[in-house]
Structure formats: structure tokens, C-alpha cells
Image (cartoon, rainbow, N blue to C red):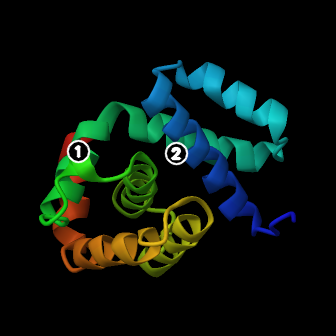
């Protein structure tokens, strides 16, 4: 059946699918997003949001992964499922870089995406890592401020 999602959740899920495809295939972000949009039309403002996620994450993917790895020490990043990794990248980008999403909302949205797209263990794993990140919220935000100047 059709899953009814909040508009911004829908935009995030498009971004997640795009990031996953970019990771798995190396296709160009522009092309991937255009294809996604053709399949799942989004209102302009939502497409802009999805786009800003994908293009926000692309240049700082290694930085995001380093911070995720630091807070998921029992999971070497190369063993973290691609979908899980991208869910956490989105949340961390929203929390630390775009600063438009309250912490709690970003974490809840990530858990939601985990339920929709991840494995059985995804929601708990994502929640645990992001919960740990949240404890270092100020440091992480500062870290990205110095990066993106």
C-alpha cells in the first residue's frame, strides 16, 4: 500500500534514495535527482529541500562519515549498510550544517526513514548513534562551522 508521509519526510526519502544510488552506482547527483523527480514528483519547495540535502552532503561526505564513525565505534563504517550510513549522513547534515531542523526532529526523522528503508536493526542503530552525537551537539556544530567557511 501507499505509505502516507509528511511532506518533508517524503523529500528526505527522495534524498535518501538518491544518495543510496549515487553511492552504489557513482551516477551523477544531478542525473539521479532528475530521475527520482520524474518518478516521484515533488512540489518545488520540497524538491529544493531534497536537492539541498544531496548537494549539501556530497562535498563533506568524508567529514560526516568521520564523525559518525567516532560515535559508532563498535561498527566500522565499512560494515555499516549503505542505507543506514546515508540516513545518518542526512540527519547529521540537518543537525550540524543546515541548522534548520531541531535536533529531536532530525533524529525522529532518521529513525522513521530507518523503519521505511532499513533493516530490522536500522532504527535502533540510527537512534543510538545519533543519540550519542546529540550529546556532543555544540562541538559538532562548531566543527562544521570552521569547515564550511
Nearer to us in this view, 120 or 19:
120
Nearer to us in this view, 18 or 101:
18
Instruction: Determine which quarter of the picture holds residue 41.
Output: top right
- Across and down, in percent, residue 107 comes to 45, 74
- Across and down, in percent, residue 118 comes to 51, 61
User: What residue is at 43 percent from the left and 32 percent from the top?
Assistant: 23
Nearer to us in this view, 120 or 91:
120
Label 1 crowding class (10 Å Cα cut-off): few <14, some 14-19, many 20+? few
Nearer to us in this view, 116 or 43:
116
The residue wearing badge 2 is 53
Question: From the viewer's perspective, is 135 left or right of 70?
Answer: right
Numbered disc 2: secondary structure: helix
**Count of residue discs:** 2
Question: From the viewer's perspective, is 137 left or right of 56?
Answer: left
Q: Earlier in the sequence, mark 1 or mark 2?
A: 2
Label 2 crowding class (10 Å Cα cut-off): few <14, some 14-19, many 20+? many
For the C terminus, give its image quadrant: top left
The furthest residue to the front: 120
**Residue 149 visible, this angle:** no
- The circle drawn on residue 78 is 1
- Across and down, in percent, residue 117 comes to 58, 59
- Across and down, in percent, residue 74 comes to 14, 66
In this view, 81 is above or below 5: above
Instruction: Determine which quarter of the picture holds residue 69.
Output: bottom left
User: What residue is at 45 percent from the left and 57 percent from the top?
Assistant: 87
Callout 1–callout 2 Cβ contact below 8 Å: no
1 vs 2, front mark: 1
User: What residue is at 45 percent from the left and 21 percent from the top?
Assistant: 26
For the N terminus, give its image quadrant: bottom right
Amino acid at each position: 500500500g501507499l505509505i502516507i508521509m509528511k511532506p518533508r519526510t517524503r523529500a528526505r526519502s527522495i534524498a535518501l534514495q538518491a544518495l543510496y544510488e549515487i553511492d552504489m552506482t557513482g551516477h551523477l547527483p544531478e542525473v539521479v535527482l532528475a530521475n527520482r523527480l520524474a518518478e516521484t514528483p515533488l512540489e518545488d519547495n520540497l524538491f529544493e529541500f531534497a536537492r539541498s540535502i544531496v548537494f549539501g552532503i556530497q562535498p563533506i561526505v568524508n567529514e560526516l562519515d568521520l564523525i559518525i564513525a567516532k560515535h559508532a565505534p563498535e561498527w566500522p563504517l565499512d560494515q555499516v549498510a549503505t542505507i543506514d550510513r546515508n540516513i545518518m549522513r542526512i540527519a547529521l547534515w540537518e543537525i550540524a550544517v543546515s541548522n534548520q531542523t531541531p535536533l529531536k526532529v532530525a533524529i525522529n526523522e532518521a529513525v522513521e526513514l530507518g523503519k521505511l528503508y532499513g533493516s530490522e536493526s536500522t532504527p535502533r542503530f540510527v537512534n543510538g548513534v545519533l543519540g550519542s552525537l546529540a550529546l556532543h551537539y555544540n562541538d559538532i556544530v562548531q566543527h562544521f562551522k570552521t569547515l564550511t567557511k
